[in-house]
């Protein structure tokens, strides 16, 4: 599909409620003798085809390496210190927390690595078809909370860029946001800019997203350590 076709499809998706639902829903997987969509299977719930298994061990290693040096991960230690822990206590908590977390991640990832199925399908083994909605809902809520935290943190860091460009005039602009909101206008602008810049990544499929991970794993360590040098 070329750019003009994608543009026409995007415009058509907002032409009506039915067109929008049709645009965002997954492609159906109608088996033999079936004529309607099924709630139990679609392109996201099926076993990943060989063409989608593009991630290699270096991609996973790069993903977790970039995650480990990201500002969001580093802020965990400072957050523990602000609640009263001493530096050495925070280090111990971080070590054991991430150690046991790594064990859980490895064990939990085995089903996907061996059988190429996702978390919603894996949950059906323990909770059943309808019962699996519960862990999926918990995962959705957790993802919403963590995404919100990540966007706020990214927005605060993004707000530093216009401050460096425009000086203190940007940082000291009149704050029209109520104090009870817990955010200032410059930080809110940074949040919006960060959200707008990262939102298009949602349309990148996971088999292709590994290219962004490869770039991130190279740029992230250089960027972080450059900040400390500066």
Image (cartoon, grey):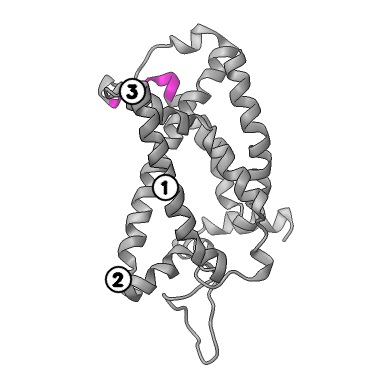
The magenta span reads 181-187
Instruction: From the top left corner, tell me how far across and down residue 203 is, in percent.
Output: 58, 52
At 44% across and 61% down in the image, what residue appears?
A: 17
Label 2: few (<14), some or many (≥20) within 10 Å? few
Instruction: From the top left corner, tell me how far across and down residue 155 is, in percent.
Output: 47, 28
Q: Earlier in the sequence, mark 2 or mark 3?
A: 3
Instruction: From the top left corner, tell me how far across and down residue 120 is, in percent.
Output: 42, 66
Q: Nearer the viewer, mark 2 or mark 3?
A: 3
Q: Earlier in the sequence, mark 3 or mark 1?
A: 3
Which residue bears the numbered disc 1? 101
Q: Secondary structure at mark 3?
A: helix
Q: Nearer the viewer, mark 1 or mark 2?
A: 1
At 68% across and 35% down in the image, what residue appears?
A: 218
Residue 19 can be seen in this image: no
Rounded to the nearest angstrom, the CA distance separating label 3 from label 1 is 21 Å
Q: Nearer the viewer, residue 144 or 138?
A: 138
Task: Specify the farthest residue to the bottom.
Answer: 33
Q: Secondary structure at mark 1?
A: helix
**Residue 146 vs residue 154: left or right?**
left
Rounded to the nearest angstrom, the CA distance separating label 1 from label 2 is 25 Å
At 46% across and 59% down in the image, what residue appears?
A: 107
**Is 183 one of the magenta-colored residues?**
yes
Label 3: few (<14), some or many (≥20) within 10 Å? some
Q: Nearer the viewer, residue 18 or 123?
A: 123
Which residue bears the numbered disc 3? 81
Which residue bears the numbered disc 2? 131
Q: Secondary structure at mark 2?
A: helix
Give the quarter of the figure containing the N terminus. bottom right
**In the rendered image of this protein, does residue 63 appear above or below residue 137?**
above
Q: Nearer the viewer, residue 153 or 182?
A: 153
Q: Earlier in the sequence, mark 1 or mark 2?
A: 1
At 63% across and 43% down in the image, what residue appears?
A: 62
């Amino acid at each position: 599909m070329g750019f003009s076709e994608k543009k026409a499809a995007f415009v058509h998706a907002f032409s009506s409620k039915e067109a929008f639902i049709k645009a965002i829903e997954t492609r159906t997987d109608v088996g033999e003798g079936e004529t309607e969509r099924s709630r139990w299977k679609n392109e996201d719930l099926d076993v990943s085809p060989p063409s989608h298994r593009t991630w290699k061990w270096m991609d996973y290693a790069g993903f977790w390496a970039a995650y480990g040096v990201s500002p969001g991960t580093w802020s965990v230690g400072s957050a523990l210190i602000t609640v009263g822990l001493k530096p050495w206590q925070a280090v111990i908590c971080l070590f054991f927390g991430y150690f046991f977390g790594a064990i859980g991640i490895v064990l939990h990832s085995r089903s996907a690595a061996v059988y190429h199925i996702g978390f919603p399908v894996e949950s059906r083994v323990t909770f059943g078809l309808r019962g699996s909605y519960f862990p999926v809902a918990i995962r959705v809520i957790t993802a919403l909370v963590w995404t919100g935290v990540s966007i706020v943190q990214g927005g605060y860091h993004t707000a530093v860029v216009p401050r460096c460009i425009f000086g203190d005039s940007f940082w000291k602009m009149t704050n029209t946001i109520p104090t009870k909101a817990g955010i200032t206008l410059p930080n809110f602008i940074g949040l919006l800019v960060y959200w707008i810049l990262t939102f298009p990544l949602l349309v990148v499929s996971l088999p292709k997203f590994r290219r962004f991970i490869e770039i991130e794993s190279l740029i992230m360590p250089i960027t972080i350590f450059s900040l400390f040098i500066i």
